[in-house]
Image (cartoon, rainbow, N blue to C red):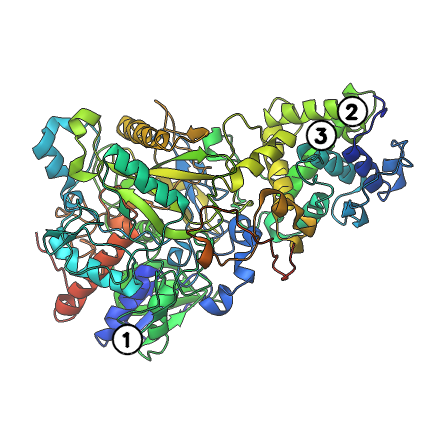
């Protein structure tokens, strides 16, 4: 017999960015909220305390801040007729666990989407004609506009102490920022961070190529800061341990630093850690959620009844929970019917590395996750898709989240993997090389989707989520185009050697190589319940007291990191709950 | 197959081997040929995970993968074998963060290792297989007893996945062994490798300083400070 807890107003599954934002907003509205986090509690002290946190072996090999795949993972395959096999070792993407989730070990790149990213499908149709969208590409417009989200982008940046420079402020172009961005209502809360060598040279090369480089908006504080909640941040000291690590310095925005200090004091909020949610419980008609069932820290099955269920897990696991619980109809790639699992997309990432002689002090060990430089001249409407031959642009950037020898030293072309020549190669490269990356958009396709695996199970006996994903010609062309542009730009800097890895024609998705944790889609927002799982307020069309904020809501992925958009969408959904749903529970959009 | 002109690193290997059980060291005739450089401290360590034959393999293979030379310390000087022996006894090497449930089916390389062995057993099973291969093709000798050139040929063959072993992909083994060797070379010394932070000094890594506020915009001179480790020691 399951333990049954007293009913609460809202139960939140997962205590990363979206969970913390929802908990803050809903307790602000007077709701009693329980947060269930599958991992341990984490805070700057003691979990991210110096010096223990900067142990590369523990952080980047034992992956102590990431999800262990031993309990839950996914299976993967390239095509709908293949047999999927488990994602057994962490490679391509790195889901987090514990309080803070992936929001504690992210880098800090904090973008807003472009205005044209919101209406991608209609924009492409209008600019290039409907036939330009290839057969099988299932891109869609977001059911919200940039203007809908602007106040929420703004607020989330102020919560995060984002460091950057506005390019367009209330309609006026400002020198030093991104001239192609949609207009901002306020300047960034903090000025940009200082430039390491790779970023400084990026500006030089971009200028010579005619690109308009600007500072990457970084939620790594450039100065002391107090956010609107009263949470304090200290200036980033470029320690070089951002990605994979929690911040030792209160400099990188995270749920732990930026929101939880307030939440932890609230009596309306209860956080339960080591609480593994197994499913959302629905009524007989599968039209209303009654709460969730989870395993408590001792492994006892526990029911938490609630009026509202907020799925705030990592994007993939939000989709997993919806499929396991029977929320909405699973997507079928053959008939095209069903919505949950539809439009899984990713990020089209490639890297080029520049090697210099010993007189060039690149010092890659000096690192700041989000700091650096980028440009949008090949993104959004700046890209002539007809000429380039693909849908969706991307950015090229200089980033230096911090390198260490265990995280790997990229050596110049021709250097072997071991022996004396390798030693010479790592010695030459370590302090005298840096890299630029291409981060391309990734379109959605009929055959790239998520469902439940027929064979493999997790430690709790549930079917694993199955990912069917492969690169399509469009993304391969985009990779080749953007990497080509990046290489042209690198040549301006006259490195002594250069390596780059554009995707090759016919290349398959390689899940063993880290590329990006920007797994998107699967439970997308839309304006048609036949082709989307969530409405414009991230509310399930089928079970209206379930909301599922996260990158799972993206109909496709753009060229930017998703966190800024995820935060803004979550605040947008929270406002709809506060201002509309609480007053009148039920579907917020009627079709 | 003689040891006519042992390199400095080879001599260090002998020194280390002399502390391993006698049966393994028996093949090494020139133990008296003391190295001039006595800084090879890997020799003080007694393995608690690997048996004598496996330990001899690890010492020999690490010495080939990261040899001592005038560029920087070799794997043996840096304590890499000690690191690996200790690392094999961590939850990580037992598959703690890997999904280990079956069925185990073959898949394209883009899906990663799909076998059922964790790292510690990948190493053990493959070492046994390679020593059996050596015994068959090199008149009863183990890998550790081969000439450097033969050892290197075998490692290259494993790296390319061309060495046929029973129960294990030689490529997967090589990948794991090379990863472990590099980790032991570059880890914080508290894990047993990177003795005296020598590998960090070789590449100019300041180690666990984790504060470069004043050096972000310095372009005209190399970063000046030596490394520090997690224990606060300075290199």
Residue B129's disc number: 3
Residue A17 x/y as whole percent: 32, 60
* Residue furthest to the front: B220
CA distance separating discs 2 and 1: 72 Å
**Residue A577 appears left or right of A518:** left
Residue A312 seen in this snapshot: yes
User: Tag 3, which secondary structure?
Assistant: helix
Q: Which residue is mark 1?
A: A32
Camera-side mark, 2 or 1? 2
Residue B147's disc number: 2
- Total count of labels: 3
* Residue drawn at (21%, 58%) of the image: A153
Residue A355 x/y as whole percent: 46, 34
Residue A48 x/y as whole percent: 49, 63
Q: Are marks 3 and 1 on the same chain?
A: no
**Residue A227 appears left or right of B95:** left
């Amino acid at each position: 017999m399951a333990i049954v807890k007293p009913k609460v107003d809202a139960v939140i599954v997962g205590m990363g960015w979206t969970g913390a934002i929802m908990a803050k907003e809903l307790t602000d509205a007077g709701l009693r909220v329980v947060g269930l986090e599958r991992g341990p509690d984490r805070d700057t002290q003691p979990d991210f305390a110096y010096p223990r946190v900067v142990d590369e072996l523990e952080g980047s090999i034992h992956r102590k801040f990431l999800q262990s795949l031993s309990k839950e993972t996914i299976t993967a395959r390239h095509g709908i007729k293949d047999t999927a096999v488990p994602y057994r070792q962490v490679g391509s993407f790195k889901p987090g666990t514990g309080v803070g989730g992936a929001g504690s070990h992210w880098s800090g790149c904090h973008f807003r989407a472009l205005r044209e990213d919101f209406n991608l499908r209609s924009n492409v149709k209008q600019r290039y004609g409907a036939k330009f969208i290839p057969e099988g590409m299932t891109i869609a417009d977001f059911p919200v506009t940039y203007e809908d989200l602007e106040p929420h982008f703004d607020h989330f940046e102020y919560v995060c102490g984002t460091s950057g420079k506005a390019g367009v402020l209330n309609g006026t172009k400002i020198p030093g920022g991104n001239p192609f961005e949609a207009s901002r209502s306020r300047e960034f809360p903090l000025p940009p961070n200082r430039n390491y060598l790779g970023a400084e040279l990026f500006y030089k090369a971009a200028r010579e190529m005619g690109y308009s480089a600007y500072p990457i908006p970084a939620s790594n504080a450039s100065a002391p800061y107090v956010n609107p909640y009263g949470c304090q941040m200290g200036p980033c000291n470029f320690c070089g341990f951002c990605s994979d690590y929690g911040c030792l310095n209160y400099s990188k925005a995270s749920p732990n630093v930026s929101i939880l200090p307030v939440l932890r004091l609230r009596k309306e909020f209860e956080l339960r850690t080591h609480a593994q949610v197994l499913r959302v419980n629905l009524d007989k008609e599968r039209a209303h959620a009654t709460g969730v069932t989870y395993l408590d820290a001792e492994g006892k099955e526990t029911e938490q009844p609630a009026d509202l269920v907020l799925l705030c897990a990592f994007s993939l696991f939000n989709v997993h929970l919806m499929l396991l619980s029977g929320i909405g109809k699973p997507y079928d790639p053959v008939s095209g019917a069903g919505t949950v699992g539809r439009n899984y997309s990713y990020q089209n990432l490639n890297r080029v590395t520049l090697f210099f002689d010993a007189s060039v002090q690149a010092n890659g060990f000096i690192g700041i996750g989000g700091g650096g430089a980028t440009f949008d001249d090949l993104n959004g409407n700046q890209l002539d898709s007809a000429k380039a031959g693909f849908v969706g642009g991307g950015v090229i950037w200089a980033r230096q989240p911090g390198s260490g020898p265990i995280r790997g030293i990229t050596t110049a072309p021709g250097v072997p993997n071991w022996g004396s020549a390798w030693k010479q190669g790592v010695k030459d490269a370590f302090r005298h090389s840096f890299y630029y990356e291409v981060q391309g958009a990734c379109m959605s396709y009929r055959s790239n989707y998520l469902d439940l695996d027929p064979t493999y199970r997790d430690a709790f006996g549930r079917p694993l989520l199955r990912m069917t994903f492969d690169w399509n010609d469009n993304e391969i062309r985009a990779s080749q185009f953007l990497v080509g542009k990046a290489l042209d730009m690198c040549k301006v800097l006259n490195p002594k050697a250069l390596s780059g890895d554009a995707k090759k024609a016919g290349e398959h998705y390689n899940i063993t190589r880290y590329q990006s944790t920007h797994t998107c889609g699967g439970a997308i927002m839309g304006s048609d319940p036949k082709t989307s799982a969530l409405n414009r307020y991230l509310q399930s069309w089928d079970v209206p007291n379930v909301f599922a904020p996260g990158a799972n809501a993206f109909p496709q992925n753009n060229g930017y990191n998703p966190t800024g958009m995820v935060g803004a969408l979550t605040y947008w959904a929270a406002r709809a709950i506060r201002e509309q749903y609480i007053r009148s529970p039920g579907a917020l959009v009627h079709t | 197959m003689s040891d006519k002109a042992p390199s400095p690193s080879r001599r260090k290997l002998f020194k280390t081997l002399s502390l391993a059980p006698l049966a393994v060291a028996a093949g090494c005739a020139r133990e008296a040929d003391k190295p001039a450089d006595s800084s090879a401290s890997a020799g003080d360590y007694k393995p608690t995970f690997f048996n004598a034959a496996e330990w001899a393999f690890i010492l020999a293979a690490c010495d080939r993968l990261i040899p001592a030379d005038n560029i920087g310390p070799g794997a043996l000087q840096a304590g890499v074998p000690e690191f690996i022996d200790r690392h094999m006894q961590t939850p990580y090497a037992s598959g703690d963060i890997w999904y280990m449930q079956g069925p185990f089916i073959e898949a394209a390389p883009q899906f990663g290792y799909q076998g059922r062995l964790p790292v510690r057993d990948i190493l053990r099973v493959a070492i046994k297989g390679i020593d059996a291969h050596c015994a068959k093709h090199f008149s009863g000798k183990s890998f550790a007893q081969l000439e450097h050139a033969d050892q290197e040929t075998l490692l290259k063959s494993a790296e390319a996945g061309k060495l046929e072993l029973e129960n294990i992909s030689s490529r997967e083994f090589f990948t794991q062994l090379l990863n472990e060797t590099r980790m032991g070379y570059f880890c914080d010394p508290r894990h047993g490798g990177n003795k005296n932070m020598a590998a960090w000094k070789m590449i100019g890594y300041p180690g666990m300083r984790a504060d470069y506020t004043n050096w972000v915009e310095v372009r005209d001179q190399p970063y000046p400070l030596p490394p520090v480790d997690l224990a606060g020691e300075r290199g």
